[in-house]
Image (spheres, helix red, strand yellow):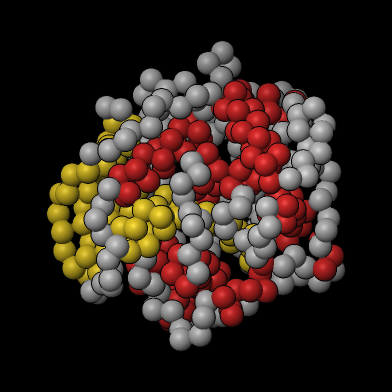
Amino acid sequence: MVTRLLVIVLGCGLCSALAAQEPPAAPAWSRIAPYFQPPAEFAGQFGDLPSPLKTAAGQPITTADQWSERRKELFATWTQFLGPWPAVLEAPKVEYLSEETRDGIVQKRVRVEIAPNQTGEGWLLIPPGKKPLPAALVVFYEPETSIGLKGDKPDRDLGWQLAKRGIATLNIGTPGGNAYKPEIGQAVCQPLSFHAYVAANCWQAMSHMPEIDKTRIGIVGHSYGGKWSMFGGALWDKFAVVAVSDPGIVFDEARGSVNYWEPWYLGLDASVTRKPGIPKPDNPTTGAYKQLRAAGHDLHEIHALICPRPFFVSGGSEDTPKRWTALNHSIAVNKLLGVSDRIGMTNRPDHSPNAQSNAALMDFFTHFLIEKPVH
């Protein structure tokens, strides 16, 4: 079997520094184009996942107009399982708490209204350049890692690296601060869906910032943040591009980190409390996750909700090349919609990002938000 892995180079400190610099002179697409074609052994392979290009009743989808209706059906189906959102905030409040300039980038401490009667503090990075700028929402456990203020977590500074590419970033952390018990207020949706709701409100806040072009706002996150960004991008279609770093892009109960079954993601059930860990007969799945699995749904349908917007997977130990069998369903949707080269994936051996995987991720944003914006 032939796979395409990003080469890992020793001397990570130097590599991280190089990856965070302004993009090389050559177009970003020239470096990432190969990652937008599945390896030969996975080309045209769809695995055992049901095609999103069939309605719930089994009728094939053959036109763009039919896909529009099918997308509404998929969205409604997932909303039924996940629970409805509260009303999205039209103009979330943003308080500016402090400001400094760091390596030419304006760094502002902000407090953002992320839900009714709920705020979260984070960091807004505004690089130099002609305004309004392209931008990205960067989500993780806490925002300091995303802007490079935690040296013990190298290569997770996605917000800082994007800013070095000329892309403004809003960097936020877990609602309430505890990823295992996120604060969801009075919301009745699953916690991961509430994270997506928070992302939608952050998009709303960013769209009112004069420094930011609201037509060019993407979303990205690593691991837990990758799950967050994938659902945020799927359930809020105003994000122009969506990127994830090794979240586990399909349900996989053999992988402990692909743990959508946990109550802090999709397994919240008021009547049952399961023990953390891989599902077993004496520790079964719960909540919406259990219901989704029983009904035959999987995350390739979430990917399909992102179509035809660009979607990039920075894969590691949880998202290996075989995940192309899920991504091929989105390629098929995009083909029906008349677009190509919108679905990409890189692969590295480890869960942790490295300088090379991040460079490709930065090139994805550079290409689709700066070189060739998709509106």
Name the quadrant containing residue 65: top right
Instruction: Return the x and y of residue 316 as percentages of the image width and height.
Output: 63, 60
Q: Let me know if residue 217 appears in the view.
A: yes
Closest to the observer, 18 or 239? 239
Closest to the observer, 305 or 191? 305
Instruction: Count the marks.
Output: 0
Up the image or down, 255 lies above or below 34; here it is above
Residue drawn at (52%, 50%) of the image: 226
Closest to the observer, 84 or 121? 84
Name the quadrant containing residue 273: top right
Up the image or down, 329 lies above or below 43; here it is above
Closest to the observer, 26 or 68? 68
Residue drawn at (82%, 68%) of the image: 40
Please identify the residue farthest to the top as the structure is shown.
271
Name the quadrant containing residue 287: top right
Instruction: Return the x and y of residue 28 as percentages of the image width and height.
Output: 52, 77
Residue drawn at (34%, 43%) of the image: 204
Up the image or down, 35 lies above or below 315; here it is below
- The quadrant of the image that shows the N terminus is bottom right
Residue drawn at (30%, 27%) of the image: 116
Q: Let me know if residue 285 appears in the view.
A: no
| Lateral position of residue 71 relative to residue 112, left or right | right
| Lateral position of residue 280 relative to residue 231, left or right | right
Instruction: Return the x and y of residue 69 as percentages of the image width and height.
Output: 66, 35
Please identify the residue farthest to the bottom as the structure is shown.
25
| Lateral position of residue 192 relative to residue 130, left or right | right
